[in-house]
Amino acid sequence: LKPHGIFAVKELDLASNMIGPSLQTHAWTLYQHAQDMAVNVRGCLRTPQLPQLFREADLSHVNFAYVFGERRSPLTPQETEFIQSIIEYHASIAQKLTTLSAEEHVLWRNMERFESTDHPMKRPYYHFREGHVVVVGRFDPHSFLPM
C-alpha cells in the first residue's frame, strides 16, 4: 500500500448469509462448530469487525457498506449450480465435524441430494442471500509512529 493510497476490501459475511429459510439455524450451528477447524469460516464470521480492525491499525477515513445478493425461486440453472456448490461446501465441512449431532450430519447429507423432490431449493418460497462487506479507507503514513 502506497502512502496516501486508497485501499478497498470486500469480504464474505457468513453471519448475514441465508441458505433458505429452513436451513438458517443449521448453518449457524455448523459455523459455530467449524470455527476451530476452518480458518475461512472463522474469518468470515468476524467480517463485521473489519472496519474497526482497520481503524485500530491506524488506517484513516475508514468507511464500509454491506452488499447483498439474493436469489429466490424459481432459480435459473446458473443460480442452482452456484447455490449447490455452496451447499456442497457446507456439507463437506459438516462431514469433518465430530462435534455436530447425528441429526445435523443427516441433515447436511440430505442437503446434497439435490434430485430429491423435497429439496428446499425446489420449494416455491426458497430464498438464498449472500452478504458482503466492502471496507474502504486510506493509508496515511503520518498516523504511524516510528518504531
Image (cartoon, rainbow, N blue to C red):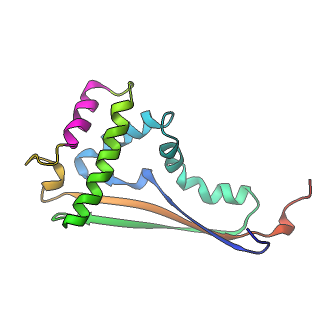
Residue 130 can be seen in this image: yes
Q: In this view, does 80 lie to the left or right of 139?
A: left
**Residue 26 rendering spot, x and y as whole percentages:** 31, 40
Q: Give the quarter of the image for residue 129.
A: bottom left
Q: Which residue is drawn at 19% across and 38% down?
A: 110
Q: Looking at the image, which residue sits at the far right?
A: 146
Q: Is residue 90 left or right of residue 76?
A: right
* Extent of the magenta region: 101-112
Q: Give the quarter of the image for residue 80.
A: bottom left
Q: Is residue 112 above or below residue 49?
A: above
Quadrant showing the N terminus = bottom right
**Residue 65 rendering spot, x and y as whole percentages:** 52, 68
Q: In this view, does 130 lie above or below 24?
A: below
Q: Which residue is drawn at 34% across and 43% down?
A: 90
Q: In this view, does 127 lie above or below 91?
A: below
Q: Is the magenta stretch mostly helix, strand or loop?
A: helix
Q: In this view, does 67 lie above or below 94?
A: below
**Residue 42 rendering spot, x and y as whole percentages:** 51, 43
Q: Is residue 9 magenta?
A: no
- Label tally: 0
Q: Does the magenta stretch include residue 105?
A: yes
Q: Looking at the image, which residue sits at the far left?
A: 117
Q: Residue at x 50, y 50 (%)?
A: 44
**Residue 57 rendering spot, x and y as whole percentages:** 74, 57
Residue 19 can be seen in this image: no
Q: Residue at x 51, y 33 (%)?
A: 36
